[in-house]
Amino acid sequence: MKKQKTDSKLYTYRFRIYSNKEQTAFLDEQIGCNRFIYNFFLERAINLFKIHNIKFNYYESKKILPLLKKGFPFLKLANSQSLQVSLKNLDSAFLNFFQGRAKFPKFKKKINTNSIEIPQHFAIDNSFLYIPKLKSAIKVKFHKKVYETVKSVKITKTPSGKYYVNMLVEKFAYSPYMPKKTVGVSTGIDLGLKDFAIVTTGKSLNDKESYKIPNDKYLARTQKKLTKLSRQLDRKIHKRSKRDKTTPSKNYVKFKNKLSILHEKITNQRNDFLHKLSLRVISDSQVVTLEDLNIKGMVKNRHLSKSISDVSWYKFISMLEYKADRFGRQIFKVNRFYPSSKTCSKCGYIYKDLKLSERSWTCPVCHTEHDRDINASINLFLEGLKIGKELTELTPAEYAPAGYQNIGISHHTMK
């Protein structure tokens, strides 16, 4: 989700495309042209900087596009606006690199997810999509109705060979959307690896409940099958280096598709779990409190990086944020140095010598036995009660449209 103005927001709806052979060949051709433009100008930018110390310039590169079509006639079959978007994406990649938000741009590979963006001259009629330079209409499976005006469409091809269309729409604050009903409930969430999340929810200190949500470990459960398929794939006839001109065998293509489908299944399982859990949390709570985790730094731990990537904390937090924004909820992030596990949730005593291996401890002051993770979620829950105590006095969400509430996500830092 992208934010444009205070009174409007941009959302993306994703739908599955079912194209015939002719349409599939056309889409592959269009995606290949866009990938060629991106890689061509990336290589050109690298050489210009190495030899002449000249940085990439979008407007100068844009002037070369018409000349490039004379040298490469197959580019004439592509949508010119889509080629310009690929060039603009390269410009954004360089901008993110120079501003320290991303790594240096990489060349696009055919085996990865590829896409083509169509900013104009497209049409949607019932269950069909019309795009430039394609006479026939592409069938789209709309699993929900789109009432907003579609600003642009982006067709994506996954490594498993499936096609999707991403429709960018703009929602205004005065759109007739009613948020979820609220009952003044606060929730504290402590994210973990053994258990995906430990949740404490309730209205007060005496009216609360804590429970653990197990970590299904989708990647770890399928690791043996992935390893077996990868070894079988490596034994098939295929290129062993860039200079190798060996044609991949049919068995190589078959096992490659099997591996892609398995990876896609893992991703879909994980996304399904995250979507359902985030919607459940947002639907049942008015205030959600969690820690501001340094996920980027935690992934550098070579012992835990694979497990942290598998649980997808960052994606889960992102889902919580945009769904809270949509349903009129509040998200608060407590400072990452807040001792949620070491603080006694009953008397406030801080056990400074608590080690990571200690999963439970007893408070020496009030003699309360604490489960490390449940105690952390209770402390986050209590912080949420302190921060959001004024929210219960606001107009109930079921009586006010989302646009007239405090939709902005609050990032509160506790010191």
Image (cartoon, rainbow, N blue to C red):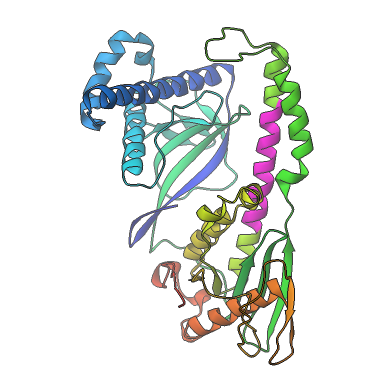
Residue 269 falls within the magenta-colored stretch: yes
Q: Main secondary structure of the magenta part?
A: helix
Quadrant where the C terminus sits is bottom left
Question: How many marks do you count on the picture?
Answer: 0
Q: Residue visible at 50% across and 46% down?
A: 13
Q: Residue visible at 23% across and 28% down?
A: 53
Above or below, comparing residue 401 to residue 382 in the picture: above
| Residue 388 visible | no
Residue 337 falls within the magenta-colored stretch: no
Q: Nearer the viewer, residue 13 or 345?
A: 345
Which quadrant would residue 255 be assigned to in this image? Answer: top right
Which quadrant would residue 17 be assigned to in this image? Answer: top right
Q: Is residue 133 left or right of residue 183?
A: left
| Residue 277 visible | yes
Q: Residue visible at 39% across and 36% down?
A: 104
Q: Is residue 137 left or right of residue 370?
A: left
Q: Which residues are magenta?
A: 258-276
Residue 145: x %, y % from top left: 53, 48
Residue 292: x %, y % from top left: 51, 65
Q: Nearer the viewer, residue 287 or 91?
A: 91
